[in-house]
Amino acid sequence: MKAFSLALFVFLASRLAHAAQTLNVYFIDTEGGQSTLFVSPSGESMLVDSGWPGFNGRDADRIVAAAKRAGASRIDYLLITHYHMDHVGGVPQLAARLPISNFIDHGPSVEHGKEADELVAAYTHTKESGHHILARPGEKIPIRGLEVEILTAAGQEIHRPLTGAGAPNPYCGAVKLREDDPSENAQSVGTLITFGKFRMVDLGDLTWNKEYELVCPNNKIGTVDVYLSTHHGLNESGGPEIVHALHPRVAIMNNGATKGGSAEAWQAMHSSPGIENIWQLHYAMAGGDANNSPQRFIANPEADAKQDHGYGIELSAQSDGAFSVINSRTGETKAYPAPNR
């Protein structure tokens, strides 16, 4: 009996030690909004965006459920990429359910009007309960166990390439710039999340010209393992010049059934050199069967959004660059071994 107890103790201790050495990421279904929870090996948490308001607290409840699965009893850092309803609208409902220690944003909004002002006012009132951090390109978010570098904020981007980056980008020559975007999308706080050799990028809803400035004529970011599709996979972002330069092994698309997932953005990911899989929160009706992944890589495959069950995608990364992705609808897991680099 003692031998069995000792073996059980060793097994559980091994599992806990392994869990403590991983970065866990939860891509929460907010029906075409954004909310991504990072739980560092240190146990500290960072949530990027809070999804929509309303819907009887649907998005806040889904975030709380993800935090519970992750063993997080609070949000240590809440990073708001920009002030649009599907990214910042859920903050008051979330704060009523979970304590939030630090609020990170790009500063004043560039959009005004009754709805825009009310949205920012609700967020501003809520963030008074915690500590405020102004996002600046080139600075880092002090979450223990991770390196989170701010790439873009308030319409500005890093001026110098990151360590190991800076190579000329051969995909820039074919790019046609668009009219400048005056909206909050172009103000998005973009980040690079690094855990050992594992690298993931999240650029919020950054739009076409601002992405171009990040990677053209030289790629200031370098390559990544995981690319979270910019702007939910809409064709206002995510051109080949940035996706191909990032050279991700896996893309994850935080789309809704009827929002995001355009054929152009999906094809930019699908044709990217080195891409292994595209995981999607929803089947994208805009893309059709030719521009959607097989169902095993889609958390919510129903074409009718009313049939959606809110399944998410989870990722677990190790410091050697190996990671695995889980479809929470099926429990199916795909492992991606550490790269040779």
Image: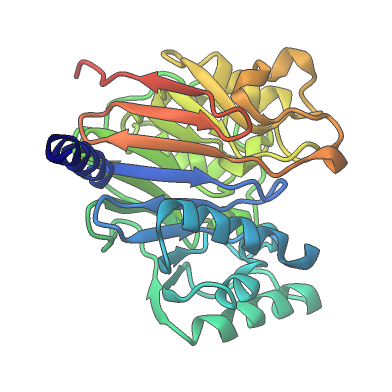
Extreme-front residue of the structure = 1
**Would you say residue 104 is visible in this rendering?**
yes
List x then y, in percent, for residue 12: 24, 42
List x then y, in percent, for residue 296: 62, 19
Q: Does residue 315 appear to the left or right of 281 in the view shown? A: left
- In the image, is residue 318 above or below residue 89? above
List x then y, in percent, for residue 155: 50, 58
Tell me the quarter of the image containing the N terminus.
Answer: top left
Rendering quarter of residue 43: bottom left
Rendering quarter of residue 215: top left
Depth check, front residue: 82 or 131: 131
- In the image, is residue 53 above or below residue 145? below
Q: Does residue 134 appear to the left or right of 233 in the view shown? A: left
- Numbered circles on residues, count: 0
Q: Residue at x 69, y 74 (%)?
A: 119
Q: Does residue 10 appear to the left or right of 50 in the view shown? A: left
Q: Does residue 171 appear to the left or right of 196 in the view shown? A: right
Q: Residue at x 78, y 36 (%)?
A: 257
Depth check, front residue: 34 or 212: 34
Tell me the quarter of the image containing the C terminus.
Answer: top left
Q: Residue at x 72, y 60 (%)?
A: 58
- In the image, is residue 152 above or below residue 324? below
List x then y, in percent, for residue 170: 40, 18
